[in-house]
Amino acid sequence: MTTSRLVLLAGVWFITLGTRAQDLRLELTGGRWGFSTETRGSSFEQAEVYAGVSLPWDCDFADNWWFHWRADVTAGWLGSHGENAFVGSLGPTLVMHHLNWPVSLEGGLSPTYVSRYRFDPTNLGSNLQFTSHAQLNWDIGEHLQLSYRFQHMSDGGLFHPNPGLNLHMFGIAFRF
């Protein structure tokens, strides 16, 4: 295996050192619920189930720091004032943690499908959205993980209007 590799993912270059391959495996599964941060006339809520599959790229970085790629898939509900939609996404996530700490940080960008994009009075622009996120995880024991996630969903300026939607999400997951 090479000791240095450039990985182009979601339009961002990352340099990984000491890369080692591992098998694809189900890493975690769980659920999240959250609410919007704006008050522009519409408040949103979202609930979803998710699963993460380990990708065959990870690396050790410095003393006991570890970077790990994962593919996440979500399926859930997005609603505002009685108007409801299916929301689903699939995309990469980069997880960073220290091997001796029960907390980790992650970030990602996923293409997202929303079955309805007009919620009176908000128009999200299109059914195609992109969800970016930053998440803080806390591992409780060997298999349980609690998380806080800030996410932004928008159509990336492909359509007009493009108001975007920011959500605070809280999750619980079972780690395999």
Image (tube, rainbow, N blue to C red):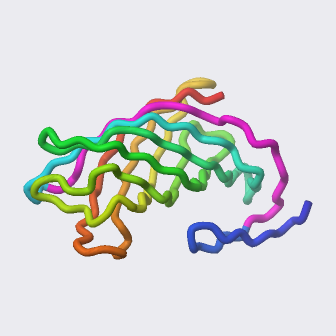
Q: Report whether 92 appears left or right of 130.
A: right
Please tell me whether residue 137 is drawn above or below residue 151 in the rendered image. Answer: above
The picture places residue 154, in percent across and down from the top left corner, at 34, 64
The picture places residue 94, in percent across and down from the top left corner, at 60, 55
Q: Main secondary structure of the magenta part?
A: strand
Given residues 106 and 117, the one toward you in this image is 117
Please tell me whether residue 109 is drawn above or below residue 144 in the rendered image. Answer: below
> From the image, which quarter does the N terminus lie in?
bottom right
Q: Report whether 46 appears left or right of 26.
A: left
> From the image, which quarter does the C terminus lie in?
top right
The picture places residue 153, in percent across and down from the top left corner, at 35, 59
Q: Where are the magenta residues, as a range?
A: 16-38
- The residue lying at 34 percent from left, 36 percent from top is 47
Which quadrant would residue 49 be assigned to in this image?
top left
The picture places residue 146, in percent across and down from the top left corner, at 46, 33
Please tell me whether residue 167 is drawn above or below residue 81 in the rendered image. Answer: below
Please check the rendered image and state whether residue 150 is part of the magenta-colored stretch, yes or no.
no
Please check the rendered image and state whether residue 20 is part of the magenta-colored stretch, yes or no.
yes
- The residue lying at 29 percent from left, 56 percent from top is 166
Given residues 73 and 115, the one toward you in this image is 115
- The residue lying at 62 percent from left, 67 percent from top is 9
